[in-house]
């Protein structure tokens, strides 16, 4: 059942008909005509996309969308059911096949990004001494060579990149069926322990170093792909700073971002 589009003016963040046809089977945790359903599921999803894209707080979601609590409650159900991970996986497989690649990648790129804390997240934030003592959270992300999300971890900013290699590699192999053989990283992942942690999960860690005579911006082989993925994430204002009290909330917020970014390519 589709909502009456004449009831309100559309927002730029609203899901398109083609996008909805793709994601609806994953989002429908119960029948659309179930008696306990009070709101159109598509409108609830539109509300979640509006919040993540616009960067607002839950309680400031517009009144012409379902109530903030309805959207929040349904989002929690989606998170517990793992629907966003499923959508990202399906999108990644389709887009890889469309590019003439194998369904599952043999290579990954791993990097991290520190985002500044807010009063809500300040209690769990850390200082990133490498980046001018920036206080906040660090997003550790792994993508395939096309920039599609594979794995993601959120830690305080003072946590070292190499300490997350084991968890990321484990998650990479879980979502790819252990197809990954190599992971490209920067010099923050050097060290024998990081190599051993990756090797434990069947992945070779290859460090891509900066040229010795660096002048200005340098496009590094392989590694630029994950930087582009971070740039995609920055389009969603909710993810530019850490507004969440729990790291899990920041983690899952990234998945609707990649769902939207990649769904546009096939819809």
Image: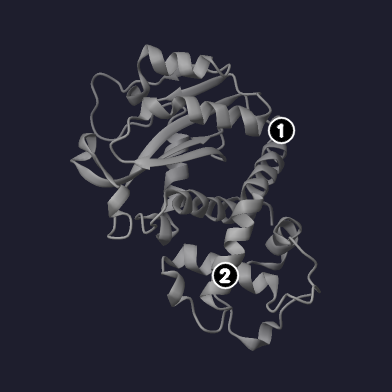
Crowding at mark 1 (Cα within 10 Å: few <14, some 14-19, many 20+): some
Where does the image place residue 77, in percent across and percent down from the top left? 63, 59
Question: Marks 1 and 2, Cα distance to the nearest angstrom?
Answer: 33 Å
Quadrant holding the C terminus = bottom right
Where does the image place residue 136, in percent across and percent down from the top left? 29, 48
Crowding at mark 2 (Cα within 10 Å: few <14, some 14-19, many 20+): many
Q: Is residue 142 above or below residue 6?
A: above
The tag on residue 246 is none
- Residue 19 vs residue 27, the one in the foreground: 27
Figure quadrant of residue 191: top left
What residue is shown with label 1?
103
Q: Is residue 67 left or right of residue 215?
A: right
Q: Is residue 232 left or right of residue 245?
A: right
Where does the image place residue 55, in percent across and percent down from the top left? 41, 65
Q: How many marks?
A: 2
Figure quadrant of residue 158: top left
What residue is shown with label 2?
71
Residue under the point 58% across and 73% down: 70
Residue under the point 73% across and 57% down: 22
Is residue 116 shown to the viewer in this render? no
- Residue 214 vs residue 107, the one in the foreground: 107
Figure quadrant of residue 211: top left
Quadrant holding the N terminus = bottom right
Helix, strand or loop status at disc 2: helix
Residue under the point 38% across and 37% down: 112
Where does the image place residue 244, in percent across and percent down from the top left? 39, 57
Q: Is residue 121 above or below residue 60?
A: above
């Amino acid at each position: 059942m589709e909502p009456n589009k004449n009831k309100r003016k559309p927002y730029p963040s609203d899901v398109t008909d083609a996008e909805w046809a793709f994601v609806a089977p994953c989002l429908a945790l119960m029948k659309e005509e179930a008696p306990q359903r009070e709101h159109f599921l598509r409108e609830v999803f539109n509300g979640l996309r509006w919040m993540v894209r616009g960067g607002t707080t839950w309680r400031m979601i517009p009144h012409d969308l379902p109530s903030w609590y309805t959207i929040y409650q349904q989002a929690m159900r989606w998170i517990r059911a793992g629907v966003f991970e499923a959508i990202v996986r399906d999108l990644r497989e389709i887009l890889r096949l469309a590019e003439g690649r194998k369904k599952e990648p043999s290579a990954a790129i791993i990097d991290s990004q520190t985002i500044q804390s807010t009063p809500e997240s300040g209690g769990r934030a850390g200082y990133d001494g490498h980046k001018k003592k920036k206080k906040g959270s660090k997003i550790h992300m792994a993508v395939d060579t096309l920039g599609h999300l594979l794995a993601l971890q959120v830690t305080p900013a003072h946590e070292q990149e190499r300490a997350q290699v084991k968890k990321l590699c484990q998650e990479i192999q879980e979502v790819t069926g252990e197809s990954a053989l190599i992971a490209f990283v920067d010099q923050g992942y050097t060290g024998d322990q990081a190599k051993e942690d990756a090797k434990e999960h069947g992945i070779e860690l290859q460090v891509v170093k900066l040229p010795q005579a660096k002048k200005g911006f340098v496009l590094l082989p392989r590694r630029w792909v994950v930087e582009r993925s971070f740039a995609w994430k920055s389009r969603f204002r909710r993810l530019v700073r850490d507004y969440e009290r729990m790291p899990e909330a920041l983690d899952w917020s990234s998945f609707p971002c990649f769902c939207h970014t990649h769904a546009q390519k096939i819809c």
